[in-house]
Image: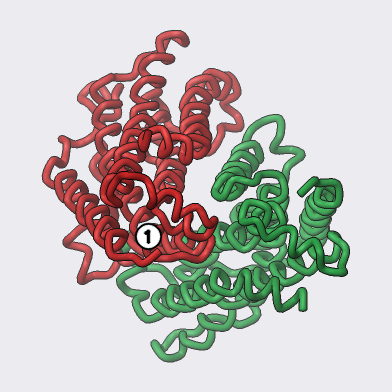
């Protein structure tokens, strides 16, 4: 029942987000053909030479990545403070379950939604490309799906923590947005540069993409497993903090 | 009283946004050596640096998101919170309710747009640099105008969609879709790229090499943008007047 409740409360945001990323991915493949037929005025992000580079410029390292990070903020907005504003918190807290169970269920549903949306490019791009006589390596899609999952879960955790800390309507969303923008800016400080805090750059493998020997495939660097582990640990810390705050909150 | 109500409902978002913009602008000034290395491998002149990091880059995108957040709220949200009945019982028309919220919100968007123009020229001399106030205020006009359109998009979304986060998601996706279409044939001939209007990229009134606005601002384009914003607000008002709360 808690799973169904969490799903009902988040499904509109999930479908909108998944639909957006899905349409983007499918559109990039379809527009690729049209842009190739009109080389005089290429769409920005499609000025690359090969198909894999175009997919990277528009999806994995470009607009879709930024949009994915933004949409994960909305997926992460949950908690019980919203219910307090609506006056339904007493009904929810009267259920014969602990607060931990309520929050963990919301987190679990949210994590599954993040995984599903991060997996969409993995399904769509290698799946649709053959219909246009193109191919995109599944291994490369899987590489970026894992990077997006790592970064997306951190954004999800940030938004969830903000939603249990800030009760004002849209305040949590605003603070989460500011946090999302602040991290890449802070990452440029010289003292912080060695730590490569800009997770958005990690999600897009900025600075590490390279060509294969035939210059036909634009390939990512080896998977940064340690960095992904750090991302997951940060996510767990953020979500644990959110759980701790909720357990102590007076509704 | 309606002004005070609209202010109370939006003040946290506005003040947090204002503080964030001031802190970020100040950071761009005081940490400009660090930040400059992050956006270009080649040394940048100070005006070019300010343009790239403020008027073209992250801060412009953040401003657009903040304009969306300021446009949210309204009677549709009050219906979900079960306070719409009290508000609608006030001896004022629905149009006045919306108009008041719109004016307060637009004023907040304009104020946010002025913050870089105040902070950057004011603080730059402290680090031995100078950024012309005239440039900053010209960008303020561009940002305030486009920001009004973005605010209007969010306001319309908040009238149409009642879900707590559905309206901001739809507004952001609408902005993203518009931005995409404005770069795609055949729509690019008919749609103004508001990102380029705000930043000056590929615009005849801006020189990217020097980071300076060189020509007169595009009054026709700005008027068209304001007209579009007014149209969106008018549609929102029309829908609100017919909604059943």
Left or right of B94 in this view: A79: left
Left or right of A119 in this view: B19: right
Query: Does the rendering let one see residue A75?
Result: yes
Is B174 in front, or is A17?
Answer: A17
Query: Does the rendering let one see residue A206?
Result: no
Residue visible at 29% across and 29% down?
A218
Instruction: List x then y, in percent, for residue A21.
Output: 47, 32
Residue visible at 53% across and 38% down?
A44
Is A193 in front, or is A118?
Answer: A118
Chain B drawn in what color? Answer: green
- Name above or below for residue A195 compared with residue A121: below
Q: Which residue is mark 1?
A: A164
Element type where label 1 sits in the image: helix
Residue visible at 72% across and 58% down?
B84
Is B132 in front, or is B4?
Answer: B4
Chain letter for the red part: A
Residue visible at 77% across and 55% down?
B229
Is B158 in front, or is B110?
Answer: B158
């Amino acid at each position: 029942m808690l799973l169904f409740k969490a799903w009902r409360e988040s499904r509109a945001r999930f479908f909108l987000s998944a639909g957006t990323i899905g349409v983007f991915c499918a559109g990039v493949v379809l527009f690729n053909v049209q842009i190739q037929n009109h080389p005089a005025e290429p769409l920005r992000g499609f000025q690359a030479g090969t198909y894999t580079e175009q997919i990277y410029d528009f999806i994995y390292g470009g607009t879709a990545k930024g949009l994915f990070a933004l949409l994960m903020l909305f997926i992460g907005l949950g908690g019980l403070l919203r219910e307090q504003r609506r006056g339904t918190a007493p009904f929810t807290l009267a259920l014969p379950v602990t607060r931990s169970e309520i929050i963990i269920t919301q987190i679990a549903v949210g994590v599954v939604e993040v995984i599903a949306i991060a997996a969409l490019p993995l399904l769509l791009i290698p799946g649709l490309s053959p219909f246009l006589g193109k191919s995109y390596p599944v291994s490369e899609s899987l590489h970026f799906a894992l990077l997006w999952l790592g970064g997306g879960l951190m954004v999800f955790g940030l938004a969830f923590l903000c939603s249990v800390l800030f009760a004002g309507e849209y305040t949590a969303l605003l603070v989460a947005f500011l946090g999302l923008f602040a991290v890449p800016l802070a990452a440029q400080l010289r003292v912080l540069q060695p730590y490569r805090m800009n997770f958005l750059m990690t999600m897009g493998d900025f600075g590490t993409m390279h060509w294969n020997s035939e210059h036909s495939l634009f390939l990512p660097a080896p998977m940064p497993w340690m960095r992904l582990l750090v991302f997951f640990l940060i996510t767990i810390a953020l979500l644990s903090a959110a759980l701790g705050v909720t357990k102590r909150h007076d509704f | 009283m309606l002004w005070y109500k609209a202010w109370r409902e939006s003040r946290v978002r506005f003040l947090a946004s204002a503080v964030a913009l001031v802190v970020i602008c100040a950071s761009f000034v005081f940490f400009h050596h660090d930040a400059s290395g992050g956006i270009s491998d080649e040394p940048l002149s100070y005006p070019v640096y300010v343009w790239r990091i403020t008027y073209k880059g992250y801060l412009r995108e953040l401003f657009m998101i903040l304009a969306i957040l300021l446009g949210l709220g309204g009677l549709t949200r009050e219906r979900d919170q079960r306070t719409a009945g009290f508000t609608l019982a006030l001896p004022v028309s629905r149009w006045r309710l919306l108009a008041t919220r719109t004016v307060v919100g637009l004023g907040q968007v304009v104020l946010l747009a002025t913050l870089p123009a105040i902070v950057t020229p004011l603080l730059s001399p402290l680090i031995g640099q100078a950024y012309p106030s005239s440039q900053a205020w010209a960008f303020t006009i561009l940002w305030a105008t486009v920001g009004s359109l973005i605010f209007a998009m969010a306001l319309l979304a908040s009238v149409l969609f009642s879900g707590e986060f559905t309206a901001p998601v739809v507004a952001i996706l609408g902005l993203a879709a518009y931005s995409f279409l404005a770069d795609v044939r055949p729509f690019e001939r008919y749609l103004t790229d508001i990102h380029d209007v705000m930043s000056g990229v590929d615009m005849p009134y801006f020189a990217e090499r020097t980071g300076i606005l060189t020509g007169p601002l595009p009054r026709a384009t700005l008027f068209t943008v304001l007209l579009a914003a007014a149209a969106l607000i008018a549609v929102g008002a029309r829908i609100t007047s017919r909604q059943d709360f």
